[in-house]
Amino acid sequence: MQSSDRYPAALLASFAAIWLGLAIAPWYRQDWLLENVIVFVAVPVLALSFRRLRFSNFAYSCLFAFLVLHEIGAHYTYSEVPWRQWLQALAGTVDGGAESGRNHYDRFVHFCYGLLVLPATWDLMTARMSPRGVWRYLMPVFFVMSHSVIYELVEWLAAEVFGGDLGVAYLGTQGDVWDAQKDMALAAGGAVLGTFVMALRSR
């Protein structure tokens, strides 16, 4: 193994360990399986295409962070991730009371999708398309936004096919009729912020 390959390999090994840990006794096994379809596809593709399309270590770090956040959501199911309790524990203010209001962990991860997938998209566009001028900044954002739309359509289709509690858990709207639109807007916002970050890094 070349020295330049060690960091991506370490990230892959770390993610495998985290994935295995979170695969043990997820709260809803069927929802966990549905949520992990993206992992079962994305991780092998990234590994098999590593030699042909090498992303930067920064891009791999961002992808690692996003996948870990996604696995946390898959383990608990997004609408039930106990992030409030974790924050209370860190602040030393655990009161043990019932939590009320919408669980925004899914919204946070949709924003992180745009932010954390953008660097790899930037590398992909640079390597395969070489966009120039304003298109260097617009194409990565449009690419991430299109994926966000596709994901929402897949969620809708899965909810229609599976129905019942599984469909509701996977869709995760939590009663918000504008959930899909808000998720896509957050992913777009994250992608725009990610573009600013990559533009600064490229200078």
Image: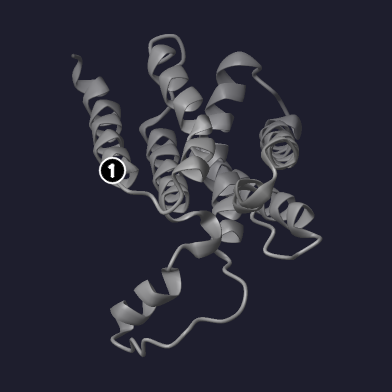
Q: Secondary structure at mark 1?
A: helix
Q: Position of residue 151 (x, y in %)?
A: 68, 37
4 up-or-down from 162: above or below: above
- Residue 174 image-quadrant placement: bottom right
- Is residue 128 left or right of 44 when viewed as pictured? right
Q: How is the image coloured?
A: one colour
Q: Position of residue 164 (x, y in %)?
A: 67, 49
Residue farthest to the front, as pictured: 164
Q: Position of residue 28 (x, y in %)?
A: 46, 50
The residue positioned 66% from the left and 46% from the top of the image is 167
The type of residue carrying mark 1 is Ile
- Give the residue at mark 1: 18
The residue positioned 64% from the left and 55% from the top of the image is 172
| Most foreground residue, 113 or 60 | 113
Q: Is residue 203 visible?
A: no
Residue farthest to the top, as pictured: 52
Q: Is residue 91 visible?
A: yes
- Residue 55 image-quadrant placement: top left
Q: Position of residue 203 (x, y in %)?
A: 52, 40
| Most foreground residue, 183 or 187 | 183
- Is residue 93 left or right of 186 when viewed as pictured? left
- Is residue 128 left or right of 97 when viewed as pictured? right
The residue positioned 50% from the left and 41% from the top of the image is 30
The residue positioned 75% from the left and 35% from the top of the image is 134
